Amino acid sequence: MCVCPLALPGAEHSGALPGKLRSADRSMVEVLADHPGELVRTDSPNFLCSVLPTHWRCNKTLPIAFKVVALGDVPDGTLVTVMAGNDENYSAELRNASAVMKNQVARFNDLRFVGRSGR
């Protein structure tokens, strides 16, 4: 996937908005490069998350802590809740699906998919 800045009318000479977009894209690329194979993009351009195993038994702890990484400024102490689903099950039942943001990272130490989670 390639993300390119948009050419906006009147922005040809200022360069402000396209530069900001390039800078934001670069920070995501840099974060992904710093953690190869560990983080993936989410539906939100402001967050990355840990890669999940392709198959995992229900109600078992993940082999590593699941992480959500904020690319923008999110205050420490912000409660983060994750949701999961797929085409068959749009809302999976999760256990321990909330964590607190600290230094732009929310760590879910015991995230579990309960039953047929739809992961």
Image (cartoon, grey):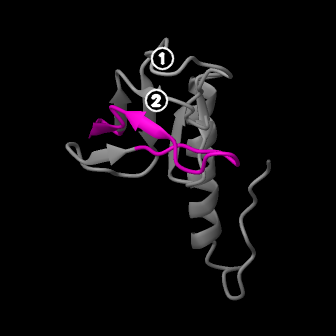
| Pick the front one: 116 or 81 | 116
Q: Position of residue 73 (x, y in %)?
A: 35, 51
Is 18 within the magenta? Answer: no
| Pick the front one: 60 or 31 | 60
Which picture quadrant has residue 45?
A: bottom right
Q: Residue furthest front?
A: 115
Is 99 within the magenta? Answer: yes
> Is residue 79 toward the left or the right of residue 83 in the image?
left
Give the number of marks.
Answer: 2
- Closer to the chain start, of discs 2 and 1, is 1
Q: Nearer the viewer, mark 2 or mark 1?
A: 2
Q: Where residue 114 is drawn, which disc sits there?
A: 2
Q: Which residue is mark 1?
A: 62
Residue at the (59%, 51%) spot, across then down:
90
Q: Position of residue 75 (x, y in %)?
A: 25, 49
Q: Image quadrant for the C terminus?
A: top right
Element marked by disc 2 = strand
* Kind of residue indicated by mark 2: Val
Element marked by disc 1 = loop
